[in-house]
C-alpha cells in the first residue's frame, strides 16, 4: 500500500509541477529576476499550494506517526554549520543559474529536453561526489 500511495503522490506532484510550469526553466528564471522582467505567477502557485496544504498540516500535526509509515523521518539538528551554508548556497546558485531544482528537473525528463537531461546527470554526479566527500 505504501508504494501505491508513494507512486500516486509522485504522479500528482509531477502533474502539479507541469501544470504550474515549474519545469520550465525560463518561467523559474523569470520569477527569480526581481530586478528585471519579473514574472510573479509562481508566487500564486506557491500561495495556492499553501492554501491547499495548510489545513492538512493542522489536521495531522499531533499524530504520533504518519498514516503510511512507522515513524516520522526528520532531523532534530538545529545547528547552523559550514556544510549547511555551503550546500544551501550551491543549491540556490544552481537553481538560479539553471532554473531547475531536483524535483522539477526529474519531471522535465519526460519532455526529453537536452538541458534537463544534462542537469539531472550532473545532479546525480554531484550526489555521488557529495556522498564520497562526506563519508571519508
Image (cartoon, rainbow, N blue to C red):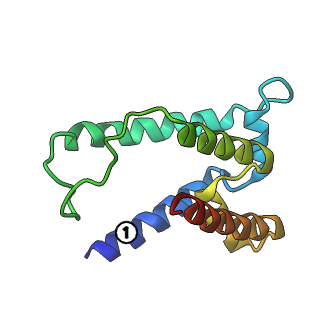
Q: Residues within 10 Å of mark 1 (few under 14, many from 20)?
A: few
Residue closer to the observer: 133 or 92: 133
State which quarter of the image contains the N terminus: bottom left
The image position of residue 16, as x and y in percent, is 54, 55
**Residue at the image point whose x is 47% and y is 62% from the top:** 12
Residue closer to the observer: 88 or 32: 88
Residue 125 at least partly seen: yes
Taking 107 as reference, is 33 left or right?
right
Q: Which residue ends up furthest to the left in the rendered image?
A: 64
Taking 10 as reference, is 105 left or right?
right
Q: Which residue ends up furthest to the front in the rendered image?
A: 136
Q: Which residue ends up furthest to the top in the rendered image?
A: 35
The image position of residue 114, as x and y in percent, is 83, 70
**Residue at the image point whose x is 60% and y is 45% from the top:** 87
Compared to residue 10, the image places residue 96 above or below, namely above
Residue closer to the observer: 62 or 128: 128
Q: Which residue is mark 1?
A: 6
The image position of residue 120, as x and y in percent, is 69, 67
The image position of residue 10, as x and y in percent, is 46, 66
Compared to residue 50, the image places residue 101 above or below, namely below
Compared to residue 85, the image places residue 114 above or below, namely below
Taking 94 as reference, is 136 left or right?
left
Residue 18 at least partly seen: no
**Residue at the image point whose x is 20% and y is 57% from the top:** 71
Say what secondary structure mark 1 lies in.
helix
Amino acid at each position: 500500500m505504501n508504494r501505491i500511495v508513494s507512486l500516486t503522490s509522485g504522479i500528482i506532484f509531477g502533474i502539479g509541477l507541469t501544470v504550474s510550469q515549474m519545469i520550465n526553466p525560463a518561467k523559474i528564471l523569470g520569477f527569480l529576476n526581481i530586478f528585471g522582467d519579473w514574472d510573479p505567477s509562481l508566487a500564486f502557485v506557491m500561495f495556492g499550494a499553501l492554501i491547499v496544504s495548510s489545513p492538512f498540516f493542522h489536521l495531522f500535526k499531533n499524530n504520533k506517526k504518519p498514516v503510511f509509515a512507522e515513524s516520522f523521518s526528520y532531523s532534530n539538528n538545529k545547528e547552523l554549520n559550514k556544510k549547511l551554508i555551503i550546500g544551501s548556497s550551491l543549491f540556490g546558485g544552481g537553481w538560479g543559474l539553471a532554473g531547475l531544482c531536483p524535483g522539477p528537473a526529474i519531471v522535465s525528463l519526460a519532455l526529453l529536453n537536452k538541458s534537463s537531461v544534462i542537469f539531472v546527470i550532473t545532479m546525480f554526479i554531484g550526489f555521488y561526489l557529495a556522498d564520497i566527500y562526506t563519508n571519508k
